[in-house]
Image (cartoon, rainbow, N blue to C red):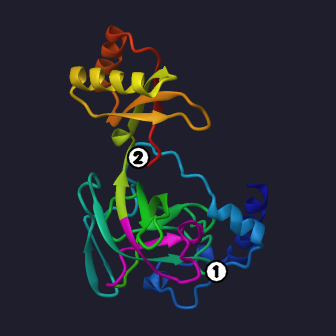
Amino acid sequence: MRQLAWVALLFGLLVGCASQAPRESGRYDQDQDAAPILTPAVMERLANLPNPQVLDLVPSSRGNPPTYNVWGKDYQVLSTSEGYSEEGNASWYGTKFHGRLTSSGEPFDMFTLTAAHRSLQIPVFARVTNLANGKSTIVRINDRGPFHSNRIIDLSFAAAVKLGFHEAGTARVRVETISEKTQKYLVDVGNFSDLQQARLAKGQLSATSGVEVDVVRTQGTSIYRLRIGPMVSGAPIERLKALVATLGLGRVIISAVDY
């Protein structure tokens, strides 16, 4: 990541003066925007950036008015971002806006996984999936836009690279808000060297718990486990752990599901 930091610093020096510009409607105009010139190694790193950790966020004191106006059109900010899901076109923004203040007051960094949305409360985390190739990433929405009727989200250049459409410019995507409260987990139970034993245990656990149970093979081994989930944390998992202990099915492994 050190190389990306140097790239960000260089572009920060180049556009530092622009970051002080007043916020007018031209701030949202993507004309003459461009991609940075990067080495293949840096592009590879952008394509494999890890998802940001999903945290509960407090709405920003900036950028969340009930309504606002851009180019003579009024927009309304949603009262809640919970459960939001929408499909439509995505675009990206890059060098023209790098270093300028976003609607939340943070400087825009095209090398991080962020995005702009017209109506969601900011900041908020969302999973964006490229419907053409199945690639997905988590972004933190901290800006307003895009103000084009045929687009639903503007992604940072890094997010566009990760989703594989930075060269095409736009892509059909699905946007789904996520929060720490919706974190889900997989529960793996037992270690079985015999598939038939694993299947018998599956039937026993499924009948007793009333939940769907799968038999999975541990990668690179001949060991089988029972898998339940995804399921939410708290009482459901605690009940399942107690049931597994009662049935004597062995070790319980709980792992968070990557959004």
> How far from the left and from the top, in percent, is residue 52?
54, 50
Q: Is residue 166 magenta?
A: yes
Query: Can residue 103 be seen?
Result: no
- Note whether 230 is above or below 166 in the view shown: above
Q: Residue at x 54, y 34 (%)?
A: 218
Residue drawn at x 29%, y 67% is 86
Depth order, front residue of 124/201: 201
Instruction: Give the label on residue 96, or none.
Output: none
Q: Amino acid at mark 2?
A: Leu
Task: Say which residue appears at 26% left-offset and 26% top-offset.
Answer: 206
Looking at this view, name the residue that lies furthest to the bottom.
Answer: 31
Q: Residue at x 48, y 70 (%)?
A: 133
Question: Element under label 1?
Answer: loop
Q: Which residues are magenta?
A: 149-174
As measured in the structure, the alpha-carbon distance from the residue carrying label 1 to the one carrying label 2 is 30 Å
Dot placed on the residue nearer the N-terminal end, 1 or 2: 1
| 184, above or below 168, in the image | above
What residue is disc 1 on?
35
Circle 1/circle 2 CB separation < 8 Å: no
Percent from the top left, x then y, of residue 160?
54, 71
Q: Quadrant of residue 199?
A: top left
Please count the marks in the image: 2
The answer to whether residue 212 is above or below residue 236 is: below
Q: Which amino acid does the dot numbered 1 rest on?
A: Ala
Give residue 57's mark. Answer: 2
Q: Position of residue 93 (x, y in %)?
A: 54, 77
Callout 1 environment at 10 Å: few (<14), some (14 to 19), or many (20+)? some
> Which residue is nearer to you in this view: 34 or 233?
233
Q: Residues within 10 Å of mark 2 (few under 14, many from 20)?
A: few
